[in-house]
Image (cartoon, rainbow, N blue to C red):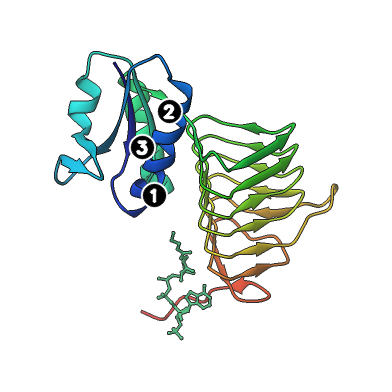
Amino acid sequence: MKLYGVVGAGGFGREVMPFVQETLAASHEEEEFEAVFVVEFGDTGVVNSHRVLSTDQFLADSGEKHFTVAISDSQVRERISRKFIRRAATPFSASALNSVCMSGNTVGEGAILCAFTTITSNAQIGRFFHANIYSYVAHDCRIGDFVTFAPNVHCNGRIVIEDHAYLGTGAILREGAADQPIVIGRGAVVGMGAVVTRSVAPGTTVIGNPARVMEKRPG
Ligand SMILES: CC(C)(COP(=O)(O)OP(=O)(O)OC[C@H]1O[C@@H](n2cnc3c(N)ncnc32)[C@H](O)[C@@H]1OP(=O)(O)O)[C@@H](O)C(=O)NCCC(=O)NCCS
């Protein structure tokens, strides 16, 4: 029996599991598989008809084990992915059946592409990418590892997004030029609803329209 673990049984994990189950059922007609939640902490048992295993239970299973990490914190995602790969689990990507990936794209292992997401053409996307519902990545974008799109992110053409960046719900990014792409720096955060017209420095948070660096509160 092959085990497919969705790591995380929080809100996002419970949103991802239905299409993991659906796509596995479509691709494993004659092969036995089980889709389970895997949690580092908290209760095991059953959630939405799927068994919940602890990390140790999952990794100790003697059969073939595949996993994806449905946790939006990218640092946690990286830590878990390293640990699971070290313990002989293999990453799998989960794409909702109505997500669209057009032509010439490369998407790294462990990606989660939720319902109504679109990747158009010639985008390069790194490992463990999350595209939450209704987000899109347009032509010629280059996206690093452990990047997170909340719902409804509009990532227009020729944008570069570095590792561990987070884009909040409804963020809109202006398209870049071939010789001067808009760059969202490593670990930057784009707040929900922001309209990004310029590059964002690594590690900074921007909000608003047009997006500006969010001032830190004193204290
Ligand atoms: C930008 C963001 C990361 C800042 O979070 P934070 O550091 O906890 O900031 P706070 O909530 O303390 O807000 C600080 C101030 O900025 C304002 N603010 C926060 N986010 C904002 C946004 N996206 N746009 C405009 N103003 C915003 C708050 O109203 C607050 O203003 P005030 O000081 O006048 O009261 C966060 O608000 C955000 O947008 N996160 C993305 C959420 C999301 O998309 N979740 C998806 C779940 S699937």
Residue 167 locus on image (x, y percent): 55, 58
Q: Residue at x 72, y 64 (%)?
A: 198
Q: Quadrant of residue 103?
A: top right
Chain-order first, disc 2 or disc 1:
1
Circles 2, 1 touching at the beta carbon (< 8 Å): no
**Distance in Å between CA atoms under marks 3 and 1:** 22 Å
User: How many numbered circles does the render carry?
Assistant: 3
Numbered disc 2: secondary structure: helix
The residue indicated by pointer 1 is 15
Q: Nearer the viewer, mark 2 or mark 3?
A: 2
Residue type at the position of mark 2:
Leu
The residue indicated by pointer 3 is 79
Q: Residue at x 41, y 44 (%)?
A: 16
Above or below for 32 versus 153: above
Residue type at the position of mark 1:
Glu
Residue 74 locus on image (x, y percent): 43, 47
Q: Few, some or many C-alpha atoms within 10 Å of disc 1 (few <14, some 14-19, many ≥20)?
A: some
In the picture, the quarter occupied by the N terminus is top left
In the picture, the quarter occupied by the C terminus is bottom left
Q: Is mark 2 within 8 Å of ligand 1?
A: no
Left or right, 100 with respect to 84, comes to right
Left or right, 157 with respect to 172, comes to right
The residue indicated by pointer 2 is 24
Numbered disc 1: secondary structure: helix
Residue 202 locus on image (x, y percent): 58, 55
Q: Quadrant of residue 83?
A: top left
